[in-house]
Image: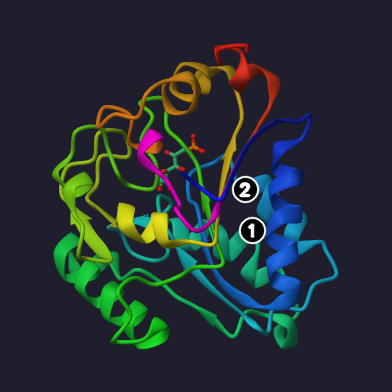
Amino acid sequence: MPVSREIAIVADPAAAAAERIAAVVRRGGQIALAGGSTPRRAYELLADMDLDWSETELWLGDDRCVAADHEHSNYKMVSEELVDRLPADRRPRAWHRIRGELGPHDAADVFEQELRATFGEAADMPVFDLILLGIGPDAHTASLFPDDAALAERRRWAVGVETPGMAPLVPRVTLTLPVLDAAREIVFLISGADKADAVARAFGDAPGLDAPSSLVNPADGALTVLLDEPAAARLPTS
Ligand code: 6PG
């Protein structure tokens, strides 16, 4: 079980997520961000905050195997919404890209080497200060899809996923579950009625391989789920 587990239904989950991330940026640390469309607003809000990111290193929890300037690139999205909008002298001291153009397996190897060079070759798992995650309507998180072999990985820090369970149907690279579980803080940012079923399966039901987001369990960390009313609509009331 996580050290703490909070499910917070709030009017503006993106703003709440931006505040959580800002708190880590103020003290400096290692942060992995989510792709997809939901976090865009959180990144815009962060770009407008008066924050010095120079003690922070930014990573992605997953990316699609496309070029860095491709419309499906999470790196491009986070660069445009956040990193490129920061003043040059207040940018993160590193902004790590996943080299998707190498193909999923080579890109995962290179990503893992970069993680090991930063977190220590001898480390069992990297310990992120905060990992931001989203969930898909199928309850996937990062690029960990229902019933995929990647869910069984216990040793690797990053793996390639050749066939994602959802669009865009391009191979992916993702952090593995044990890396998510080693984090000090996991924040899920979720909004919209189309996520209500997935939210109920992820956080209202018993964990299972058919709902990868239900498996995220940071044993020494805090788990926070920030969601709006429509996304929370099918959570059991207790
Ligand atoms: C990705 C992700 C993924 C995402 C969910 C939700 O690269 O697609 O990181 O796990 O967070 O699919 O995506 P939306 O916010 O677009 O619904």
Kindly tell me whether mark 1's CB lies below 8 Å from ligand 1: no
Q: Position of residue 25 (x, y in %)?
A: 70, 71
Q: Which mark is residue 81?
A: 1
Q: CA distance from mark 2 to mark 1?
A: 7 Å
Q: Which mark is residue 40?
A: 2
Q: Is residue 176 magenta?
A: no
Q: Nearer the viewer, residue 197 or 206?
A: 206
When the figure is inspected, residue 124 is found, relative to residue 138, above or below; the finding is: below
Q: As drawn, is 86 to the left or to the right of 175?
A: right
Residue contact at pointers 2 and 1, CB within 8 angstroms: yes
Which amino acid lies under the numbered mark 2 shown in the image of this protein? Arg
Which type of secondary structure does the marked residue at label 1 adopt? helix
Q: Position of residue 122 (x, y in %)?
A: 29, 86
When the figure is inspected, residue 234 is found, relative to residue 89, above or below; the finding is: above
Residue 175, by quadrant, is bottom left
Earlier sequence position, callout 2 versus callout 1: 2
When the figure is inspected, residue 31 is found, relative to residue 137, above or below; the finding is: below
Which type of secondary structure does the marked residue at label 2 adopt? helix
Q: Which mark is residue 181?
A: none
Residues in magenta? 214-222
